Structure formats: structure tokens, C-alpha cells
Amino acid sequence: MSAAETAPAREGPSTRRLWLLETAVLAIVGVVLAVATVNDLGRAVDINHRIGADLNTWRHYTHHDYVNISTDEKTLGEDSGRDLLCGNTSPGAPGSQTQICLTIDGPVVKGQRTVYGGWYLPPYHRDEPAYRYGCFGSGGRGRCPR
């Protein structure tokens, strides 16, 4: 082996530029991941705060201190900020009694949100328009079968 083959390779200007480019790309990826993480955590905290307020609202509105209350964001639109909460009107296993479903919207004020309406469901039925009855308020308008 000659001395030229065992000597360490010297860095040229193109190697330094490549290193700077790679470092910049990694820094940008790191910033994007940090922003996405903070955004996701903020959204999760907001949703948890809203769900707690929704449960308080349901209990206040129905005067029942039940624990098994279903919450649903999808029925009224995930990005709408409106939630649907359903729970029994009398004690019993979830769904084994007539249920009242409330549409809840708006900001959290004093630990609660605004009830805009809802409907009732007979025992042992899923929340589908065919089973809804007794719609009330603007939140129930157009959501019950005619």
C-alpha cells in the first residue's frame, strides 16, 4: 500500500456544502415535528376540556349524575365543535332504558356548554334517525324521521 491510499481523505468545498444542506434539512424537519407535536397536544387538551364540560352539561340538564354517558363528535361533524351526548333517563345499564341525546355547542362557560336540542331513543336501539323521537330545540330539528 502506498502512503496516498492510507492517508485520510480531505474534505473539499462540496462536502462542506452537503453537510450544511443535510444539517439544514434535519433542522427544518425537527422544527416541523415540534410544531406538529405542540399542535396535537393543544388539540387534545381542548378536546378533553370540552368533553369534561359536556358531561357536566348533560348532568346539569338532565339532573342525573350518571357516569356512563356516550359522547360522539362524528354524528354532527368532527370539525363542527358540536357534540352529541346520550345517556339513560332512568337508572340501568347503558342503553337499557330510554335515552336522551343532547346536542351541545359553543364555548365552555363556567364548566358547561350550551344545549341546542336533542331527541329521545327507545331502549336497546342505536342512535339512528329511524329510532329517534321527541326531537326538541334547534339541535334536533331535521334529525328525527317525519
Image (cartoon, helix red, strand yellow):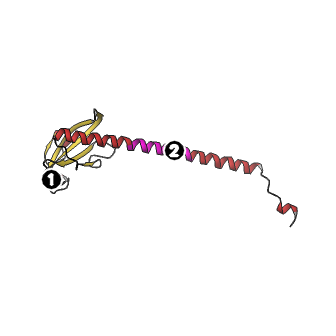
* Residue 2: x %, y % from top left: 87, 65
- Mark 1 or mark 2, which is nearer to you? 1
Magenta highlight on residue 129: no
Secondary structure beneath label 2: helix
The secondary structure that most of the magenta stretch takes on is helix
Task: Give residue 100's mark.
Answer: none
Q: Residue furthest top?
A: 110
**Magenta residues?**
29-44
Secondary structure beneath label 1: loop
Task: Give residue 34's mark.
Answer: 2
Along the polypeptide, which appears first: circle 1 or circle 2?
2
Quadrant of the image occupied by residue 6 = bottom right
- Three-letter code for the amino acid on which mark 2 is drawn: Ala
In this picture, residue 59 sits left or right of residue 8 = left
Residue in view at x 18 percent, y 39 percent = 61
In this picture, residue 73 sits left or right of residue 16 = left
Mark 2, other Cα within 10 Å: few <14 / some 14–19 / many ≥20 = few
Residue in view at x 17 percent, y 55 percent = 93
Q: In the rendered view of the protein, which quadrant contains the N terminus? A: bottom right
- Three-letter code for the amino acid on which mark 1 is drawn: Gly
Say above or below: 124 vs 77: below
* Residue 59: x %, y % from top left: 20, 41
| Viewer-side residue, 114 vs 21 | 114
Mark 1, other Cα within 10 Å: few <14 / some 14–19 / many ≥20 = few
Task: Give residue 92's mark.
Answer: 1
